[in-house]
Amino acid sequence: MSKDFFKVKKGLNIQPTDPTSLEDLEDGDIIIDSTDDNRMKVYDSSSEDFASVGTGGTSGNFLTEFEKLTPDLSNVTSVVDTATFLPIDDNNKSVKATWAASAGYIQYESAVPADVEGQGLMTVWLKTSVQGLTLSTTTDGVVQSSVPVIANNKWKQYEILYAIEGTEQGFRVEASGSVTGDVFIDEAFVG
């Protein structure tokens, strides 16, 4: 199987690397399996097996062109921004969410096909200097897993694995306390 899959490198560009064997993989590594319609899979070292990640491949994004979607907002404003975007972004735009001395969130969700289940992957790039934000996966509007957002005003990619369930999956950037400032959101993937 060593030539039938590619490990996905984490970093600015998602570029596949070619591991020589399963021993090159660590628990939680994401691979692209060329023997299974280029589906993305996550490696489980305890079982030495793979679980599908969403619908797989590069087309498995439930949030395709998320900038065109209308987000769920709570005490936050948002606009599509063409001045600040991830340098590797093909469409040269991001979403700018603004908090003005408020707690609140911006959330994107999209329908999950009825015949899809298993392990999902949410990845998104964020850039902010606002302290006290969290990034979460959501299922039907309910927060599932969360990580703190780093406030250093540099683009950072976040990845969270989640269980695909419910009718809608997505992500939320949230301030539980009063904050002021902007968060730029780009290259969102939920699948």
Image: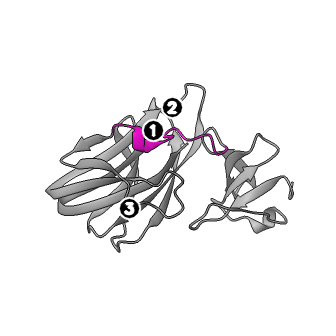
Q: Are marks 2 and 1 in contact (CB under 8 Å)?
A: yes
Closer to the observer: label 2 or label 3?
3
Q: Callout 1: 10 Å neighbours few (<14), some, many (20+)?
A: many
> Circle 1 sits in a helix, a strand or a loop, which is it?
strand
Which comes sooner in the sequence, label 3 or label 1?
A: 3
Helix, strand or loop at mark 3: loop
Q: Amino acid at mark 2?
A: Val
The percent position of residue 59, horizontal first and vertical second, equals 62, 40
Q: Is residue 91 magenta?
A: no
Q: Residue furthest bottom?
A: 152
In the image, residue 183 sits, relative to residue 59, either above or below, namely below
| Disc 2 target residue | 112
Q: Amino acid at mark 3?
A: Thr
Instruction: State which mark lies toward you, 3 or 1.
Output: 3
Q: Could you tell me if residue 37 is visible in this image?
A: yes
Left or right: 129 as drawn, with respect to 51: left
The amino acid on which the numbered mark 1 sits, given as a three-letter code, is Gln
Task: Report whether residue 138 is seen.
Answer: no
Q: Is residue 59 magenta?
A: yes
The residue most toward the top is: 114
Tell me which segment is drawn in magenta. 57-70
Q: Which residue is mark 3?
A: 84
Give the mark, 2 or 1, whose residue is nearer the N terminus: 2
Residue 124 located left or right of residue 150: right
Q: Label 1 belongs to which residue? A: 169
Residue 134: name its quadrant: bottom left
Q: Residue 126, relative to residue 107: is it above or below?
A: below
